[in-house]
Image (cartoon, rainbow, N blue to C red):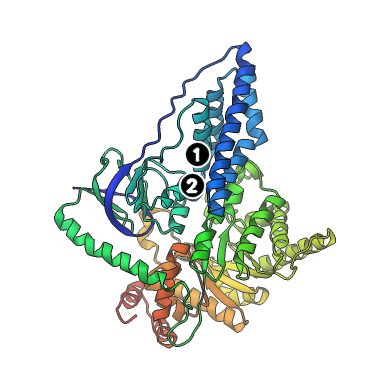
Amino acid sequence: MKTLKGVPVSSGITIGKVQIIARPKLKIRRKNIRQEQIETELQKFEKCLQAAINEIDQLISLSENIDNRNILNTHKMILRDPEFHKNINKMVAEDLLSLEMAIKNHFSSIIEIFNNIENEYFSQRSSDFEDVAYRLLSKILDKKNDKFAELQDDVILVTENITPSEVTRVFQKKIKALCTEKGSKNSHSSIIARSMNLPTLVSITGLTDNIKNGDDVIVDANEGVLIIKPDESTMHRFRPLWEYEKQERIKLAQLVDEDCITQDGRTINLMSNIEIPAELDQVLKIRSKGIGLFRTEFLFMGHKGLPDEDEQYEIYLHIAEKLYPHPVVIRTIDVGGDKLSQILNIEHELNPNLGTRGIRISLKHIPVFKTQIRAILRANRKGNIRIMFPMISTVGEIINIKNIVQQSRGELLEEGYEFEPDIAIGAMIEIPSAAITSDSIAEECNFLSIGTNDLVQYTLAVDRDNDTVEQYYIPHHPSVLRLIKMTAENCHQHGIKVAICGEMASEKKYIPLLVGLGIDEFSVSPGRLLMVKNEIRKCKYQDVRKMAEDILHYKTYIDVYTRITAKEC
């Protein structure tokens, strides 16, 4: 028996046999061509390029998932990028590189840019370019590209890595779980696996060296453990957990059409967080009451340049129409200047988390900001879009933003665009200064949403991505809970609702406490929504409200943790 650690990206426990799928290696050696070979190489480029596009078109036509088709269409856009064609033509015609070497160099440089971004979510955007590069090079080298043709049903798939467009396909094979040696929690592939509730472990060091086809394994994607060839005592311990989880999934599925309401009649709106449009099918399947947080960063990080207004508009409109009449909360771009430095010519910052990020970067680059605002306003054709701004620290920022929104609205109306001009405006409360002055901010907004991930980080001065200080990252610290309560009270005094959209909202032990603190709306990942609904339906609002009031007077986070994990809660 051997136990390997991995990064859990989609929870669940499962037991089964392994099927290893290995992508054939493409060996590309540096090779120069002669002058007279240039035309032949460029003709081959056009032929193989069209073959790759035709293959993607075929996959699009066979896909029943509209959002998976969107991902494949993105891959087509990469292949049709004029800058890509210009670069390949230059390397072949001027540098006399072989076609395969030119393509390898082009994509390697892009992938290196993404991999060097010091943010796990954005660094994993490279998988889309890896997928496209492999598909095209397979055509040029005349290699078969279908590595999943022999994949069986009801197996645990083990592979070195997996691309976004492949996840949906293997899910249709009804595999039990997915384990990869590479990858990250926030890659597109992981996001899609999570939205499909497929138990998934990634970044398992030594995976392919320690496992063979047909091995019996236990995948514990709750704790991030893969157990290879478990002994009987281990199997005896995990079988009941596996059976329990299967029964729990069946029970949770029965809650799809049930209202999210406490036992004493308080309704809590339950919505979904999404990062890419590919998650929409799962959102609809679980009857989410809308999108409480659509992170728009992927639009900005997948390009060499900035996305234009029409491109953004089409994506926002698609989401809004698909979710109508439920609300869609679109958050403007929330990244640091270090992520957009190459596009916006921003100087390096020693501490990006405390630097030019979120709304600060938007207000520093008004034309970029207005492009996004205009696209969001235009997409509000049916009036179900709300707009939310990240990293707000003062009411003055909101007043400034509202002026920009008003100016953009006027311009669009003058230009003859048809849309619902009255759009709800909200602010993310994720900085202590925003929580403390949330009375003033609430007065200028239609709703507020608490981002607990950053609120904890900034309140406790703890880098949430730094493992060496993770013991200090305490969501239930009394200071954090008091800021949440303060924000909720200020919202209610001004007659607006308060939502919570951080990871804290999807942790079972915190849900009764957050309801008791006065949270009106929860926005969580689609894979956790039914669990959150189940926990809310167990609550009696009057009881959890009293519990929360008691907890607010506790002096230490240890006291708080003891109380919130007690059975009575």
Whole-percent x, y for residue 214 in the image? 25, 43
How packed is label 1: few (under 14 Cα within 10 Å), some, or many (20 or more)? some
Give the residue type at disc 1: Asp
Assign a secondary structure to mark 2. Answer: helix
Q: Which mark is residue 164?
A: 2
Residue at the disc numbered 1? 131
How packed is label 2: few (under 14 Cα within 10 Å), some, or many (20 or more)? many
Can residue 396 be seen here? The reply is yes
C-alpha distance separating marks 2 and 1 = 8 Å
Work out whether 77 lies above or below 327.
above
Q: Nearer the viewer, residue 252 or 511?
A: 252
Whole-percent x, y for residue 14 in the image? 30, 57
Q: Nearer the viewer, residue 30 or 287?
A: 287
Work out whether 447 lies above or below 158.
below
Q: Which of the 4 image quarters holds residue 162?
A: top left
Q: How many marks?
A: 2
Instruction: Identify which residue is drawn at 37% across, 79% down.
Output: 554
